[in-house]
Amino acid sequence: MPAHNAFYGQSGGVTSVINASAAGVIQTARNYPDHINKVYVGENGILGALTENLIDSSLESDEDIEALKHTPSGAFGSCRYKLKTLEEHKREYERLIEVFKAHDIRYFFYNGGGDSQDTAHKVSQLSESMNYPVTCIGVPKTIDNDLPFTDCSPGFASVAKYVAVSILEASLDVASMSATSTKVFVMEVMGRHAGWIAAAAALASSDDHDLGPDIILLPEVEFKEQEFLDKVNATIERKGHCCVVVSEGVKRPDGKFLSDSGVRDAFGHAQLGGVAPVVADIVKQADGHKCHWAVCDYLQRAARHIAAATDVEHAYALGKAAVEFAVQGENAIMPTIVRTSDNPYQWEIGKAPLAEVANVEEMMPSDFISTDGFFITPECRKYLQPLIMGESYPPYVNGLPAYITLKKQKVPKLTQAFEI
Amino acid sequence: MPAHNAFYGQSGGVTSVINASAAGVIQTARNYPDHINKVYVGENGILGALTENLIDSSLESDEDIEALKHTPSGAFGSCRYKLKTLEEHKREYERLIEVFKAHDIRYFFYNGGGDSQDTAHKVSQLSESMNYPVTCIGVPKTIDNDLPFTDCSPGFASVAKYVAVSILEASLDVASMSATSTKVFVMEVMGRHAGWIAAAAALASSDDHDLGPDIILLPEVEFKEQEFLDKVNATIERKGHCCVVVSEGVKRPDGKFLSDSGVRDAFGHAQLGGVAPVVADIVKQADGHKCHWAVCDYLQRAARHIAAATDVEHAYALGKAAVEFAVQGENAIMPTIVRTSDNPYQWEIGKAPLAEVANVEEMMPSDFISTDGFFITPECRKYLQPLIMGESYPPYVNGLPAYITLKKQKVPKLTQAFEI
């Protein structure tokens, strides 16, 4: 069997470890020269395939590919672009086949979350419906941790670690200031639909101390203002201050996002996002407590400097497994993490059909949320704790992480331009 | 000469390394039993002296005191409380003497920024004006880096490192998303009067890559909206996206804080702080670019997990020097960092009179700011670069930093209660 080229693409919101998956794909493909010739990487994911902007990964040095393991974000560019059905996007699918044929691409590795796995699934249908042979494997990734079948999604655990470390540190700060200054600290984290990230902040709490978050506001639990304020005040009464972690996706009982506070600027424009200032304002207006608030935004998902070693290992292993599955003749699947033991944490690689992965959002189970809705349960902690284990520090030069910037040399174009 | 007890207090906004100074004071004092008996630490700084809430540091284990070197925030509690003049606060000064006498306290070490050095200076005047012999040494600390005489202030360098690492990582994120999503990222950092922290973000930029901040908004430079928007657009035109770091203290030409945007909630209340959302909103309203923003707030000054090794060394050395100066008979001074070489960075301990330190704010020199006002100069970089050198990781347990919580056992009270 002659070797063919492979396409790899990064898709959706990036993470601090998605490049480790890229390294897993590229390095492993180099071990199978009988099957895979070169790995062409789409500039900005599937858009790179459609526009024939292909980066030749074989022109990057071994050292630079290795450095992807400790470099956050999408080194090849990512995209938010969703392929529609074969009927609706017939032109796009035909274009993909045109580019794949021109560059002898018979392997398609797509690294992303639910929407991206849906894209991978649709591309896998090319084989049958449009009679073009392409082996299609999804590589999971999403900080939202909402992919089904897998124990967790690469990217999530490092955000979890960042969030837990950050609220631990901030809670020490507030504890030392609260006698004469700040009483309430509010930290906003990502998670529009699922509360996994906010939940992970609870790992900063412990039976050994009274630090970390006192209240966690999850998108799964509707925000009841008076119950929240009562809990804030009870916490201040008990320990002198209160730390709150709030998910960006928290909603009021009427279904509106809490961040949509009705605040308007002088011109009547809706104020730009941010639920932490809204929560801080609710506390301040109701009870006059001095508040501070932080919004982590991209910092949390880019924070490779505090990535979880487990997460980096998962990400690399899944990229590696994707290639191994492909050369073994598997198709239309996504490798997964299968947990075999909580403590010590042990895991192995499994697989799930793309058809069943696509567009399924795995929410927090209700037994992971405390009865008052303001914290997680021991069961949830048992799930989360192993994921943040281990530090995986990048090398430093001049006091800063030595993140790699690739050369990203393009494969010469062989087709006519295509307008998206 | 018989030994006497010492008072140590933490004051003002805390940092990720102020506890390293505490360790320097406490460990060094233990080396001079002929001069210093016990170190009593004020619970919440000077308030602990006034209320006779003194923590007996001799009851903490050697291991726990050692662990202060890697624990952020003020382990003994800090305060925002400023002693007024001897005339205005006569009652408070008499109370201090009462407590000092009762506990045989003849050394006073006060760890803080400009206001706190002013307090230290006033306490030093007790000796003469109220005839009570107390050796008084300030220990510098402030993330604002605005103390005079010293090369830098402990706490600042670690914030500088946090800010530079964070914007480096976020800029990688935005670069990978900008093809189809976010074009502008705005990160807010502390610094109400001086722009040192925002300036430090520039260390993430390099001749080797096009990452880090593209625009830095300093409180020293008045915010000119159209010039700013032009620069944002030119940057997007050139590289596809733009990263902005903004200091909380940036003002409009009319002298109003940019964060005071005139935004009111449904009840007409002024919206709670935050300049990053205001800057993002300005960009979005003017040019429609998709923006993301982050507000670091306490996370930046509590981030011991990414502290600069240089900073930790400075903080410890200054605590140590304070005690050594005291036992050598110095009084009413603050030990300082004296830079003797930029590259390699070399420094030694100096000293400055408290009378000249108190209430002086060291601003960014104008030759540290680029001519367009949106960046720093090479001169500024030369100053800042050595400060963020070195990583000083805390030990980790269960995936989280093993920060210490002290026992904080109180010295039995010997005086009547005092109302503040």
Image: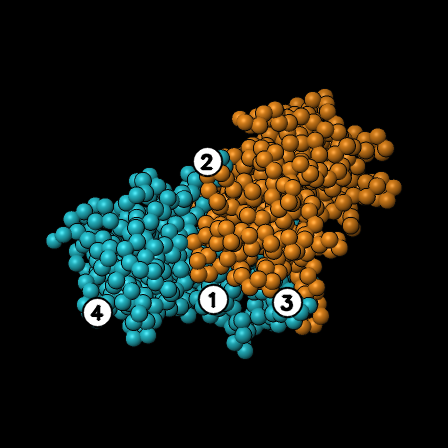
Chain colours: A cyan, B orange
* Neighbours of disc 4 within 10 Å: few (<14), some (14-19), many (20+): few
Same chain shared by disc 3 and disc 4:
yes
Q: Amino acid at mark 4?
A: Met
First of labels 2, 1 by sequence position: 1
Same chain shared by disc 3 and disc 1:
yes
Residue B353 image offset from top left, x and y in percent:
75, 29
Secondary structure under tag 4 reads loop
Report the residue marked by disc 2: A397
Q: Which chain's residue wears label 4?
A: A
Q: Amino acid at mark 2?
A: Val
- In which quadrant of the rendered view does residue A131 lie? bottom left
Residue A157 image offset from top left, x and y in percent:
40, 54
Report the residue marked by disc 3: A282
Secondary structure under tag 3 reads helix
Q: Residue at x 65, y 71 (%)?
A: A268
Check contact, mark 2 vs mark 4: CB within 8 A.
no
Report the residue marked by disc 4: A130
Q: Residue at x 41, y 67 (%)?
A: A364
Observer-nearest of A364 and B346: B346
Residue A75 visible in the shown view: yes
Look at the image and tell me in which quarter the C terminus of chain A lies.
bottom left
Report the residue marked by disc 1: A192
Residue B401 circle label: none
Same chain shared by disc 3 and disc 2:
yes
